[in-house]
Image (cartoon, rainbow, N blue to C red):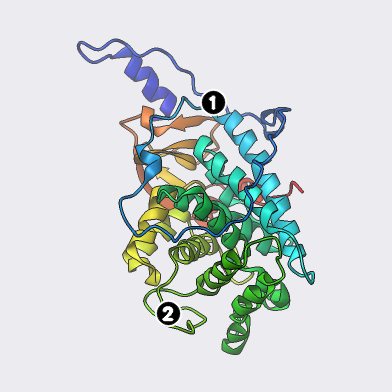
Amino acid sequence: MRFSDLRKMKEETPAAGERPRQEVPRPAVEPAAQERREKPVPAPPKPEPAAAPKEPPPPGPEPSRRTHAAPPKEPPFQEQRAQAGERYSLLMQETTSFIKAVDRPYTEKYQSVLGVCAMVAETLRTNSAFLSCVTYGTADDYLRAHTANTVILALAMGLESGLPEEELGLLGFCAMAHDIGMTGYSDLYSEPGRLTESERAELSLHIEAGAAKLERVVDLDYKVKDRAIKIVLQSHWRPDGTGYPVPADDGETDPLAQIIAIADAYEAMTHQRSWRQPLPPSEVVKELIEKEGHGFNARGVKLLISAVSIFPPGSIVQLSNGETALVLKTNRGLLAKPLLEILLRSDFSESPPELADLKDHPLISIEHSISLEELSRRNPKCAGRLEVSRWWTDW
Ligand SMILES: [Fe+2]
C-alpha cells in the first residue's frame, strides 16, 4: 500500500464522530534548480569582540531549546532546503578559508569563524532542514566537508545542552579547528587502503600539530586561546582512557571537547573514507548507544541523539508498507516520525518524486534502516543518483 492509497482510504472511511480530513496534497520534490529561488542570503551576524568565556556550566538540566515557546510554523520544505544549501555554502567557504589561513605565520580568523558559527547556530534554530547538510562530502579532500559537518553537529549538540552564546561560539571555533593539524598529513589520510600501525601513530600527531597552529591565530584573548588549545588537544581523548594524545595532567576533560569528540566520530563513521564505506547514520547512533558510547560519556551521546534523532537525516529506511525512503529531516519530539522522500515502491521500482511526513501517517512506521549497498541491490539507478547527490560540488 502506498501513502497516496492510504490517504485515499482514510478519507473515504472517516472514523465515527470524526470529520473527514481535509485534502492536504504532499508537495512534489522539485528539481534542485527550481528549489533554489533567488533570495538574498543574510550576512552572518556581526561577531562580538573576543572575551574570555565563562566557565562551562556544570552538567545539569537539559535543554533550554526545548523549553522555549512553541516555534513559529515552518516554511515549506523546499524553501528550507534552498536556504540550508545557501548557508552550507557560506560555511564551506569559511571552512576552506580557515584551513588555508592557519598555515600562515599568523592570521586573524577567530572573529570571522565566530560570525559563521553564529550563522550556523541561528540556522539550526530556525531551519530544521539544515541538519541534513551534514550528509555532504567533498570528493577532492574529505577534510573540508568533515570540518564543516563537525561544526554543524557540535553546534546542534551545544544548542541541545542549552549552552550560552559565548560557549557556543567557542564550541564552533574549536570544532572548526579540531583537525587543522591534518593538513600536514594529507598524503597519509588520502592513502587508499588501511594504514599500518606506524602510519596511524604518525597520523595521530595531527592533534598536537593543530594545537600548535592555533598559536598563529591572533585576534582572540589569550585566555580564550589557551582554552581552545586545551579543547583541541582533548578532542580525540575519551573519558574511558582511550584515544590520543594522553593528557599531560589528570584534569577534567572540557565538556566542549567531549561534544566535539562525539560530533567528530559520528561524522567520520557516516562518511566514506578511502579505505571503507560509510555506515548508515541510524546504525552509528545504535552503535554509540549499544557500545556505551565508544568510551564517550552517556550525557554526550544523549545530546547527539537529541540533535539527530534515531533515524538521522540521510538514513535510508524500510517502511512498514514496503516502500523505501530517505530521511530528509526530523520532527522535534517524534524520534521515529521524520519527513521522508519516498525512493522506491514496494516492488523496488522508482517512486515518482514524493514527500511524506510520517507524523501525518500514524499507520505507517519505519521498520529498520538499510545501507546504500542494500539500496543498490534493490535499485542500482536510484542508489547511484543518491550517492552522487551527497557530494558537495557548489564552490
Ligand atoms: Fe575529525
Residue lying furthest left? 16
Q: What secondary structure is found at the residue carrying circle 1?
A: loop
Q: Quadrant of residue 3?
A: top left
Regarding residue 241, the answer to whether it shows in the image is: yes
The three-letter code of the residue at mark 1 reads Pro
- Say whether residue 71 is left or right of residue 114: left
Residue beneath the point at 43% across and 71% down = 253
| Local crowd size for mark 1, using a 10 Å CA cut-off: few (<14), some (14–19), many (≥20) | few
Q: Decide which of 3, 361 is in the foreground and name it.
A: 361
| Dot label at residue 242 | 2
Camera-side residue of 302 and 385 = 302
**Ligand 1 quadrant?**
bottom right
Q: Earlier in the sequence, mark 2 or mark 1?
A: 1
Tell me which amino acid carries mark 2: Thr
**Quadrant in the picture for the N terminus:** top left
Residue 75, disc? 1
Q: Is residue 341 left or right of residue 180?
A: left
Residue at the far right: name it: 104
Report the residue at 70% width, 45% height from top. Answer: 90
Q: Give percent across and percent down for residue 34.
A: 70, 28
Q: For the point 68% across and 53% down, which residue is it?
A: 111
| Mark 2 C-beta to ligand 1 under 8 Å | no
Counting labels gives: 2
Q: Position of residue 165 (x, y in %)?
A: 51, 48
Element type at mark 2: loop
Measured as percent of width and height from the top left, residue 343 is found at: 52, 39
Vertical position of residue 230 compared to residue 66: above or below: below
**Crowd tier of the residue under label 2, counting other residues whose Cα lies within 10 Å: few below 14, some 14–19, many 20 or above:** few
| Residue 46 in picture, x, y percent from top left | 66, 43
